[in-house]
Structures are given as C-alpha cells and as structure tokens.
Image (cartoon, rainbow, N blue to C red):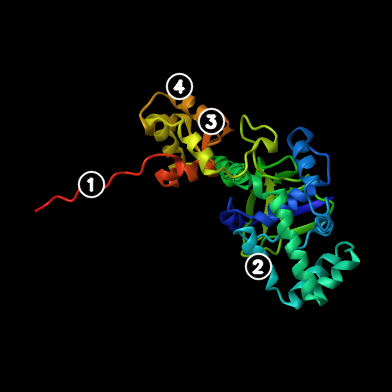
C-alpha cells in the first residue's frame, strides 16, 4: 500500500524545495498531531496547552483533518500568505467551489452530515471559517515565527544537499519516503499512482509534520508533497519556543549584542544556512569565536542551528529579523542624531 509518484527527466528538473509560509497547510498537519500521541516529549506539553484553549466549536474543524485520509482545502489550503488573508480567500469561494471540494473528498471517505450546510448556507460557511481562524490563533499563531524559522533552516540544508543532485535530496527526506528511481514511494493508506507529467514536484518542509506525508496532486502550479522539517540542534519541546515578543523583550535581547556579535547576526541574516567556517570568514574572526557567538545568539532565540553532514548551518529566526529591521527606539537604543546642516 502507498502512493507512487512517477518522475520524468523534466520532472526532476522542475522539482524544488519551497519554504514559503503556508499557515493553513501547517494547521491541518498540527490538527493531525493533536489527535495522536506521537512524539510525546516534543509535542506533549503543546497538546495539553492547546487542548485547554480550543473553543468547543473547534470540533468541526478537527473532524475535517483526520489523522489518515484526505483533508479538504477548506482546512488545508496550500496557498502562501497570512492566515487571515487565506481565510478571506475561502470566504469568497462560490457555492459550486465548496460543493466540488467536499464532493471530491466524499469520494475518498465519509464526511460528517453537517458539512452539507457549508454548501447551502453562506452564514454556516462563514461561521466555520471564523472558527478555523480562531483555531489557527490557538494552535499555531503564538509559535509561528519560530516554526517557520525551522522550515527555512531545513530548506538551507536541502539546497546544500542538492549540490550532489536532486536525487540525493529525494533519497534523504523522510523514512516514510523511499526513492527508487524514477519513482518516489510515499507511505500512505491509499494505493495509487501519481504521474507528474513534466510539472515537477514542490517539496514543502513542515514544522508540524504528522505521522504521514501529505500530497496534493492537483495543487497549482504543480503537485505538492510535504515532509518533516529537520529538528534543529538544541531544540526542546514546542512550548519552549516563545510567542511574538514585546518591545521590552526586544530591548533585553538587544543588550546581548556587542559590535562583533551584531556583525555575526547580520551575516547569518544575509546568508541563511551559512556554515560556521563561512560565518567566520565573512565576519573576519576565528571559527571558534564564530561558533561561540552563534551559540549565544541561539540561546537568545535569534538563530536556529542545523547539522548537514559534517557542517553546522546557521539560520536567523523571525525574532532576529525583527531586531535587525526595528528602528533604534523599538529596541531601547537612542535614535541617531541628525547631522547639522553646514551653513554657507
């Protein structure tokens, strides 16, 4: 049993890894994780926290994201962008679009009887989407910047692996994916063949990877397959990731930065996925010093570190980018003084 994705030479040429934010896709996978006991050390505290915060009506959203099987785009839209923008996009769906989407899922598995009201009653659809957005705000939003940093760090690793050929990337994505050229076998309860027909495959690393990969064979502009993003070194449980920080917290983080450490962070932001050796070369310091500064920045939540073979790769977090892009006043630093205009 499983899905078999068939590649041609053209498909291999057009296959790529993309870490663009896909909040509803990540949400659908998080909801699957919420219904299992997989990886208790990593997700146990998160499950307990989320379970106590979800509104009662969230049950309907969870029902449309089964642990195994298909999830409609009403919950797992693969488009990129902010969650509220994507939900507004779903609000604009016509009755025909909603009916077609649910009918396609119903051909694969049974759907709850209440889903019929989503087609016939616009108010019911909008209430469901309101709930979907609240579920996202509870399940993912507090940790979204850090989760996305993990995805970006994974992409940096895969780009380096691709130097040895795309087949090396396909062979090392996940234990649930097996590359036997020219076919990528996907562990799945479904038994089917997917022919890419020259469109290639979009590989999407996901921070909230569930028990099985997710494939969207009709995604536009090309079929999409998820795989679990690498867990960075020194990563603890999900709830050790801090929600979006306040200005006061940014000020405290800024106090850690001297001139050299600020240069280290700037290089990492400009060259995400750089190795310690590359980092040292660009800053002009010894590798041991670069490693020490990166470790301090990692402890402050500014850098994510991943390992690729014998190299250690450094990627900035969203907090780091906020810090680098913030005006001086936002991080407790004095505003630059304007230079006096010389008199003629």
Residue 289 lies in quadrant: top left
N-term-proximal mark, 1 vs 3: 3
Gap in Å between the C-alphas at discs 1 and 4?
A: 39 Å
Position above or below: 218 against 297: below
Circles 4 and 2: CB distance less than 8 Å? no
Report the mark closest to the observer, 4 or 2: 2
Q: Along the polypeptide, which appears first: circle 1 or circle 4?
A: 4
- Tell me if label 1 and label 3 are in contact, CB under 8 Å: no
Q: CA distance from mark 1 to mark 3?
A: 43 Å
Task: Give whichever of discs 2 and 3 has the lower sequence position.
Answer: 2
Q: Quadrant of residue 328?
A: top left
Using the numbered discs, state the Cα–Cα distance from disc 4 to disc 3 in whole angstroms: 12 Å
Say which residue label 2 marks. Answer: 88
Residue 339: numbered disc: 1
Q: Position of residue 41 (x, y in %)?
A: 76, 32
Against 278, is 77 above or below? below
**Mark 4 touches mark 3? (CB < 8 Å):** no
Q: Which mark is residue 288?
A: 4
Asked whether 60 or 336 is in front, the reply is 336
Q: Secondary structure at mark 3?
A: strand
In the displayed structure, 126 sits above or below 144; it is below
Q: Which residue is mark 3?
A: 312
């Amino acid at each position: 049993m499983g899905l078999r994705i068939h590649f041609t030479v053209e498909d291999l040429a057009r296959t790529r890894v993309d870490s663009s934010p896909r909040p509803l896709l990540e949400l659908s996978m998080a909801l699957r994780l919420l219904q299992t006991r997989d990886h208790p050390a990593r997700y146990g505290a998160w499950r307990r926290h989320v379970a106590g915060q979800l509104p009662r009506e969230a049950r309907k959203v969870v029902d449309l994201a089964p642990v195994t099987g298909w999830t409609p785009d009403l919950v797992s839209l693969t488009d990129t962008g902010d969650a509220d923008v994507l939900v507004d996009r779903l609000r604009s769906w016509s009755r025909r679009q909603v009916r077609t989407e649910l009918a396609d899922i119903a051909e694969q598995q049974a759907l709850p009887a209440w889903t019929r009201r989503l087609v016939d009653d616009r108010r019911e659809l909008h209430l469901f989407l309101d709930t979907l957005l609240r579920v996202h705000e509870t399940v993912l939003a507090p940790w979204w910047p850090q989760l996305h940093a993990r995805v970006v760090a994974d992409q940096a690793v895969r780009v380096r692996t691709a130097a040895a050929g795309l087949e090396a990337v396909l062979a090392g994505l996940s234990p649930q994916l097996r590359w036997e050229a020219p076919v990528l076998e996907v562990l799945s309860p479904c038994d089917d063949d997917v022919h890419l027909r020259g469109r290639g495959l979009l590989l999407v690393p996901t921070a909230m990877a569930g028990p099985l990969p997710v494939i969207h064979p009709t995604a536009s502009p090309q079929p999409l397959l998820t795989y679990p993003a690498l867990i960075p070194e020194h990563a603890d449980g999900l709830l050790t990731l801090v929600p979006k920080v306040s200005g006061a917290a940014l000020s405290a983080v800024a106090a850690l930065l001297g001139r050299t450490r600020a240069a280290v962070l700037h290089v990492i932001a400009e060259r995400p996925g750089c190795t310690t050796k590359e980092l040292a070369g660009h800053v002009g310091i010894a590798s041991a010093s670069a490693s020490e500064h990166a470790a301090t920045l990692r402890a402050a939540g500014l850098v994510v570190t991943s390992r690729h073979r014998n190299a250690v790769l450094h990627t900035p977090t969203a907090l780091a980018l906020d810090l680098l892009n913030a005006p001086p006043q936002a991080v407790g630093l004095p505003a630059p003084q304007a230079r006096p205009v010389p008199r003629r």
